[in-house]
Amino acid sequence: MKAVTQLLFLALVVLLGACEPPPRDAARPPATPAGTGLEDTLLAYADQVRESTGVPAMGVAVVTAEEGLLALVVTGERVAGSGEAVQPGDLWHIGSCTKAVTAALYARRVEAGEAEWGESPLLLRPEAFTGAAEEWRSLPVEAFLNHRSGIGSLPEAFLLTARASSASLPEQRMRWLTERLEAPPGEDAGSFAYSNFGYMLVGAALETPESAWEEQVADFLIETGLDEGQFGFGPPQGDQPQGHAGDPPFPAGQGPFADNPLALGPAGTLHVSLEGWAKFVHLFLIDGGPMLAPDSIGTLTTPWPDASDEQALGWFVSDSPAGPVVYHAGSNTMWFAQALILPEQGYAILVVTNQGGGMGETAVVSLTQLAMGAVKADRETSR
């Protein structure tokens, strides 16, 4: 919550016009192509932030309702000290920004008539949750997607042992959920308490014997327009950026300890190219387009349980002088990513870095702020 609160504050500063642009003379990696005037500005900003924070690499994309992907730039190294420049099509781990995809999958089930808002996700698979305490069956899916279910945090034993499990990911999810659901919700049920466990439950409820959560996400993203090579789960493999931790940044590699256990998937294991992520976020600028109904977009981005809250379903929301702001940040401690959408302004900004921790957060928040100023200036110039 600290990260998204800081982001929102800085974003509002830009919207109020209190942002001073950085110098434009930062060096540019030769692998990053020159594009539009906006891309030139974004690249200068990304270079400045990367150099001032020491993160290995950064990327930023601007998405608009009319054009879709309007601008995309990347800068820096795939692995710190390697000299291998990041490329525009590279993959970035987006952590908890995955939650918006899980929430969208549930919305699709509602549209298909297979689920309902306001009812328990356990009803999607009653045969799988027979041992659950009765109290869980009265909690609506919104409580899980909004972090108010009282399910609590994932057990420490999960984080310590799940990587070594030979069971399938759906089997792993159900093992931990079955054990937790035997007891009733915690005393904090009804109050906001950020929980990856709740998203694991929703993802498990969406699964069928024929289709794991990962397969459903893949089908959804491909239907949205992504290519198979534009996304995946866990740390990106092959000739791709690696996550980093520490100061100076230390590469995490591409093995199982370069991410949280994969069974955490519905809460945050997705990696995606900036172009691919832009295609998903674009849906929230065009009332769902061909993929989601306008009512679904409205439900996913409306505060719950009432307008006084800043938590929606898979997103956080707030008001600003420029209208509603829909946003989420994500990190597995080795990457940091953030999406910020201004629906009434008709654009969104996506920012990523392959560095976790404080420097990753600082870099992403700073570049988001500067990118918003660049978009604002570009729009004023083009009027």
Image (cartoon, rainbow, N blue to C red):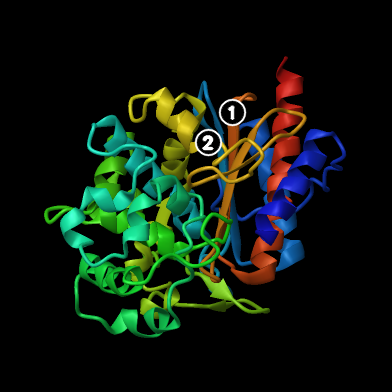
Q: Quadrant of residue 356?
A: bottom right
Residue for badge 2? 301
Q: Is label 1 in a helix, a strand or a loop?
A: loop
Relative to 215, 371 lies left or right: right
Q: Quadrant of residue 204?
A: bottom left
- Residue 161: give its label: none
Q: Is label 2 in a helix, a strand or a loop?
A: loop
The image position of residue 162, as x and y in percent, is 32, 79
Residue at x-position 27% and y-position 70%: 178
The image position of residue 189, as x and y in percent, is 51, 59
* Looking at the image, residue 19 lies above or below residue 156: above
How packed is label 1: few (under 14 Cα within 10 Å), some, or many (20 or more)? some
- Check disc 2 and give the amino acid type: Thr
- Quarter of the image with the N terminus is bottom right
Q: How many marks?
A: 2
Relative to 296, 304 lies left or right: right
Say whether residue 44 is visible.
no
Residue at x-position 68% and y-position 51%: 46
Q: Residue furthest front?
A: 134
Residue for badge 1? 343
Residue at x-position 83% and y-position 34%: 16
The image position of residue 223, as x and y in percent, is 27, 36
- Check disc 1 and give the amino acid type: Pro
